[in-house]
Amino acid sequence: MDEELRSLTDRIEAEAGGTDAFRRLLTAEDDEELARVLVARERPLWAREIAAFRLGCRGDRRAFETLVLLLNHRDPERCVSAAHALRLLGDPRTPRAAAALATNGLRTAYALHPVRLLTALRAPESVPALVSTLHRLLAPDEPHWRVALACVEGLGSLGDERARPVLEAALAHPRLGTAAAEALRRLPTG
């Protein structure tokens, strides 16, 4: 069992109550059985999460929609598991979905993991989405500075010159200045 699945299992075990259904989902080898959980009526969230995670890690695109919903969940641990499975899934829709979640001003409180996923994906959508999100989060008294910091760090990691103006603007932000300076050093010169 890999570390991400172990973490998911430990977190969900109490929620699932150690039921037979929980154990069955963890050991099921039949992708069709797991996929049926995603569309079955009245299945608990923990069951859908296990099925989507396992299918996503196996590259089964039927997990995509459930994983995107979990990536935008209020529970950060669910977001972490979904981001991991989405990275492994390799679905071409993933960067666009992560960009939509990261740039949605109404869901900024839940954008940390979509921002980190965009950085990891290094997709064409990554830099424009991170620039747009960071630009919006530089407003005075913006409470979501951790999301802004993830954007700064992500832009530094991506090393794209298009990020220079917003990173320069972030230099003046008390919580972002040091990271913005480091990100700017990582951009290509000249």
Image: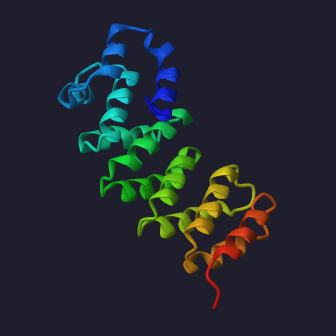
Quarter of the image with the N terminus in it? top left
Q: Position of residue 152 (x, y in %)?
A: 65, 63
Q: Position of residue 85 (x, y in %)?
A: 40, 42
Q: In the picture shown, does residue 55 fall above or below 153?
A: above
On the question of residue 67 being in view, the answer is: yes
Q: In the picture shown, does residue 189 fall above or below 22?
A: below
On the question of residue 75 being in view, the answer is: no
> Residue at left 31%, top 56%?
93
Count of numbered tags: 0
What scheme was used to colour the molecule?
rainbow
Can you name the residue that lies furthest to the front here? 1
The answer to whether 131 appears left or right of 165 in the picture is left
The answer to whether 37 appears left or right of 152 in the picture is left
> Residue at left 46%, top 42%?
72
Question: Which of the pair 41/84 is nearer the observer?
Answer: 84
Q: Position of residue 46 (x, y in %)?
A: 40, 23
> Residue at left 37%, top 47%?
88
Quarter of the image with the C terminus in it? bottom right
Question: Which of the pair 7/45 is nearer the observer?
Answer: 7
> Residue at left 37%, top 34%?
53
Can you name the residue that lies furthest to the right here? 174
Snapshot quadrant of residue 62 = top left
The answer to whether 22 appears left or right of 146 in the picture is left
Can you name the residue that lies furthest to the left here? 32
Q: In the picture shown, does residue 22 fall above or below 118?
A: above
Q: Position of residue 120 (x, y in %)?
A: 49, 57
